[in-house]
Amino acid sequence: MFTQYKYWKPYISPFDPCKPIEVKYFATPPQLYMGFQPYGLPQFQTPQEALRAGTLWPQLFSPYPFPIKGGTKHD
């Protein structure tokens, strides 16, 4: 299973005067994992759902704002 959200741990200098950001996150759009749009993809049931999501196809929906809240730690 893939995830649209990735993270990385940047180098933290011992001489940095600011509090470091230990883990940085970024999102990748779902169309990167699809290759091409297959025929017959399921669509949202109502135009209101599609407008709220910003796309007609649920597989191409990427939630916003970023779902991972501060304080989440990764190994």
Image: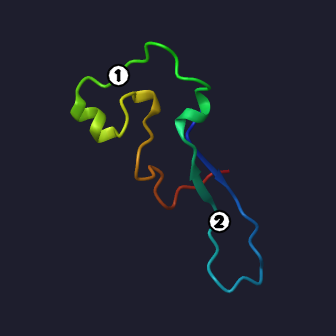
Mark closest to the chain's N terminus, 1 or 2: 2
Helix, strand or loop for disc 2: loop
x, y percentage for residue 52?
28, 41
x, y percentage for residue 4?
55, 40
Q: Residue at x 62, y 79 (%)?
A: 19
Which numbered dot is residue 43?
1
Is residue 71 shown above or below 58?
below
Q: Decide if residue 47 is on the left or right side of residue 68.
A: left
* Residue 71 visible at all: yes
Where's the N terminus, which quadrant?
top right
Q: Nearer the viewer, residue 69 or 36?
A: 36
* Residue 1 visible at all: no
- Which quadrant of the view contains residue 20? bottom right
Which numbered dot is residue 22?
2
Q: Residue at x 58, y 26 (%)?
A: 34
Residue type at numbered disc 1: Gln
State the CA–CA distance, disc 1 to disc 2. Answer: 39 Å
x, y percentage for residue 27?
55, 48
